[in-house]
Image (spheres, rainbow, N blue to C red):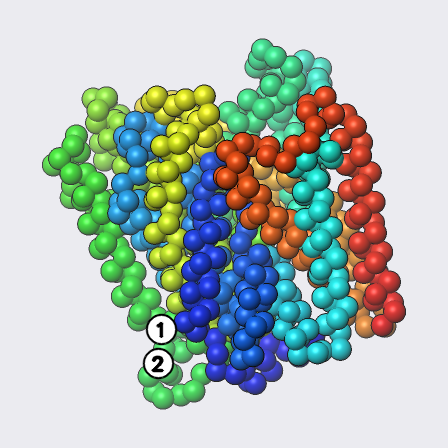
Amino acid sequence: MTDTAATRAAERPALELTLRGILLGGIITLLFTAANVYLGLKVGLTFATSIPAAVISMAILRGFKDSTIYENNIVQTVASAAGTLAAIIFVLPGLVMIGWWQGFPYWTTAAITGTGGILGVLFSVPLRRALVVDTELPYPEGKAAAEVLKVGSESREGAAESAKGLSVLLWNAIASAGYAILTQTRLVAGEAATWFRVGGGATGGGFTLSFALLGVGHLVGISVGLAMFVGVIVSSGILLPMLTAQHPLPGGPEAWAGQIFGDDIRFFGAGVIGVAAIWTLLRIAGPVIGGIRSAMVASRARHAGEALAVEERDMPIAAVGLGSIVMLVAIALLLYEVIGSGPLAGSEVSLIAGAVVFVAVIGLLIAAVTGYMAGLIGASNSPVSGIGILSVVAAALMLVGLFGRDQAPDTVAALVAYALIVTGVVFGVATISNDNLQDLKTGQLVGATPWKQQVALVIGVVFGSLIIPPVLDLLNSAFGFAGAPGAGPNALPAPQAALISALAKGVLGGDLNWAMIAWGAVAGVIFVILDEVLGMMGRMRLPPLAVGIGVYLPMSLIVPVSVGALIGWFYDRWAAGRADPEFAERMGVLTATGMIVGESLWGVVFAGIVAGSGTDSPLALVGGGFEGPALAIGMILFFALLTFLYRRTRRLVTSS
């Protein structure tokens, strides 16, 4: 594993964007998308699919003598659309919840998903140089996927160090998946949490016993990990006790904290993220403009007959511009069809013009922000639902500016639905941009051709947008959604869709929680200033976007990431003192990568088991009375396994 991406690119065989790779990626996309839609509606979370797709691809394509690392990279690029495009479920079920849709019309749903997703690919093309090439962003999951591809390729080629690397990857993946399986049997706990009173208020602490989250922490690094923990201190250490004391609610501390977190603190976090996102845009504006100029120079050089290096070959900027125009026209036609002859008929010009400009401007800005977030903490951990919150608020405010708030109830309902549809398109841009730049980082690390990856992701978007509507319709018919008219006792919660639809109604109805968003924005300004001061002093920085993520996401998800960052910091300090520090550090990356791989693969399998069984806990072997022993056994086993895995990696490093 000592060769460089440039060397790989120079010696690369012709096979990269192949028909079999596209078909294999498409099959994986269809399966993963269906699984992700169900799991996301059930528990509000989706799993990242790039790494599982890379592992599956390597297992299948090893049977072909002419397969290459670049072909495997194309497969995972196509399939990665599954984990990201499925996030449209955080918006579209809201149309059923408010009673605007009774089901999911196939071509309308596919068009909302597909046009936004393809725009996400196109908008992220000129961002590649700024956010992938000329950047120090860690891209934890992109780096992990690249390591998986390299280890798989080099084990086949017989590289000297690959046997140890593959051993670390497999052992850690097995341990990670094994523990995740045990949590589903309920014999060991999946989370350690406690809630308690603080004076007149309440707060709590939590730690998800997840090897994948620890692995992500190792890869994002100590600066991001600490920044996220600062966000946890703000949310759980300051805001929760203060707000619960001011607004006591029925029930115990857990009920208090849970409701206050959802009703207030997430809006505070959204405010922090909004300010941090704007500041991020301002900081990267120069590199982004430079990237666009560079893309135009490369395009002119290509037309002049100059040979460009493989890593410089983006999709032609003219094709990006033309494709974007075509997609925006398609969106305009879609919105015209949506308006139809309903309460908004007669206002088509202003509504469609406003929406198209909104999608073009806000979509491009969001593409940059979500790409930056993927580079900062990984695509699966980026709070794209927070971006969805800001998007729906902005879309609803645009409609308030056009129509005001004093409208008939049926007009308000139509405006809420319109805001959700426009947000759905923008959300497609956000999720795919979030994933695309991560995939391009993986490609850069293995020496892939950028334009071929960009084409592959467009293909993945098409595959995903075709399978999402029937899966959504099936789940709506079988279960329904909580809060929707006629929803039964087994209705799927769809928490993000419920929140986003409530936001649209709140803005258009005038009762949104603006106070917490505003206070979050003030805090965001403070964190931006703090980060800049630390930078000028030469100290470790605290990225404000990472702080906002720490506020917005539950403590139980953030703490293991922060702990993983601390463990990774200690490991890297140890690795720096070895005879071959580069090899030692790479083995640490593979240790973290294995943790992510195992749990991600199990997530795919478990989603299928849940969907097939129709129950939330198909593997449970014990009931609720075993929670105490399960927690004790789980914590002992989890940290014993963690210690064993890192010690094993260190032994392998020192034995080389």
Density class for disc 2 (Cα within 10 Å; few <14, some 14-19, many ≥20) is: some
Amino acid at the residue labelled 1: Pro
Q: Residue at x 60, y 18 (%)?
A: 256
Residue 404 occupies quadrant: top left
Q: In the rendered view of the protein, which quadrant contains the C terminus?
A: bottom right
Percent coordinates x, y for residue 422 in the rendering: 31, 42
Residue 559 visible in the snapshot: no
Residue 554 visible in the snapshot: yes
Q: Viewed as shown, does residue 596 lie left or right of 460?
A: right
Q: Which mark is residue 125?
A: none
In the displayed structure, 440 sits above or below 14; it is above
Amino acid at the residue labelled 2: Arg
Q: Residue at x 42, y 65 (%)?
A: 23
Density class for disc 1 (Cα within 10 Å; few <14, some 14-19, many ≥20) is: some
In the displayed structure, 612 sits above or below 306; it is above
Q: Viewed as shown, does residue 88 lie left or right of 606?
A: left
Element type at marker 2?
helix
In the displayed structure, 366 sits above or below 612; it is below
Front position among marks 2 and 1? 1
Labels 2 and 1: the sequence-earlier one: 2
Q: How many marks?
A: 2
Q: Which mark is residue 316?
A: 1
Depth order, front residue of 410/619:
619
Q: Viewed as shown, does residue 115 lie left or right of 634?
A: left
Q: CA distance from mark 2 to mark 1?
A: 10 Å
Q: In the rendered view of the protein, which quadrant contains the N terminus?
A: bottom right
Depth order, front residue of 308/170:
170
Element type at marker 1?
loop
Q: Residue at x 63, y 78 (%)?
A: 4
In the displayed structure, 178 sits above or below 159; it is above
Q: Which mark is residue 300?
A: 2
